[in-house]
Image (spheres, rainbow, N blue to C red):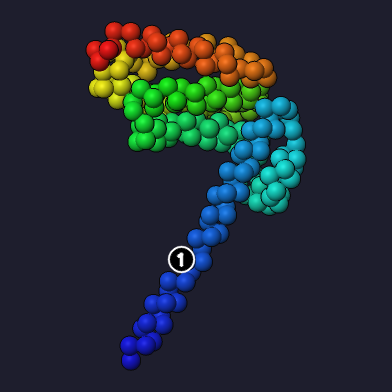
Amino acid sequence: MSQPRKDAAARSDTPAHSDAPARSDAVRNRERILRVAMAELTVRPDVPLSTIAKKAGVGQGTFYRNFPHREALVLEIYRYEMQQVADAAGELLGTREPEAALREWMDRLAGFAMTKAGLADVIRLVTSAPGGPAKPGPAPVLEAAGTLLRANEEAGTIRPGVTPDDFFLAIAGLWQLDPQEEWEPRAARLLDFVMDGLRAGAPGR
């Protein structure tokens, strides 16, 4: 009498297990579309969506299920990249000392700044239309900066009292760099200057 119950339990477990690979494939497809779209739109804001789908290796149906129109795609790229940078703060603090985590996160932030600059034209295009969607706010990145700054203040590695607003004013020069040029050395130099300024007056030094 116990065997039918066992078989029923096995059958009830099967759908959830078989759905997992499909969900994983869907996530991979979506992330691949976003990576390809970011590269293509940075170079050519009016690139056809069919070109992005082809280079991402997905069918038109899969593409449009994820992104029914250009506006949805562009704003999701922006949100996705911003969230990746924001999430990196906690990951870095979990594997590095606070000072090293902050400096490495600053490099990742520079990459996001260049993505934003490269997509500026297409973002402006989709958000400037009457009734169009609003550009996502910077709250996740501001919160991540605050987390890193607090960790460093508690460790005594930066001067006390630095706020996220102070920090972003200090690194504002990033947004003056041209993403089409070799921006990495100039960004690294600027961020080293900012890091030196944050260290000045640190109680742990």
Place residue 46 in its image quadrant: top right
Question: Is 204 placed left or right of 103 in the picture?
Answer: left
Q: What element carries label 1?
A: helix
Residue at the image point whose x is 59% and y is 46% from the top: 30
**Taking the image as drawn, is residue 139 in sight?**
no
Q: Where is residue 114 in the image (x, y as percent from the top left)?
A: 58, 22
Q: How many labels does the image show?
A: 1
Question: Is 136 placed left or right of 125 in the picture?
Answer: left
Residue at the image point whose x is 34% and y is 12% from the top: 199
Quadrant that contains the N terminus: bottom left
Q: Label 1 crowding class (10 Å Cα cut-off): few <14, some 14-19, many 20+?
A: few
Quadrant that contains the C terminus: top left
Q: Name the residue under label 1.
A: 16
Place residue 121 in its image quadrant: top right
Residue at the image point whose x is 72% and y is 43% from the top: 55
Residue 194, above or below 74: above
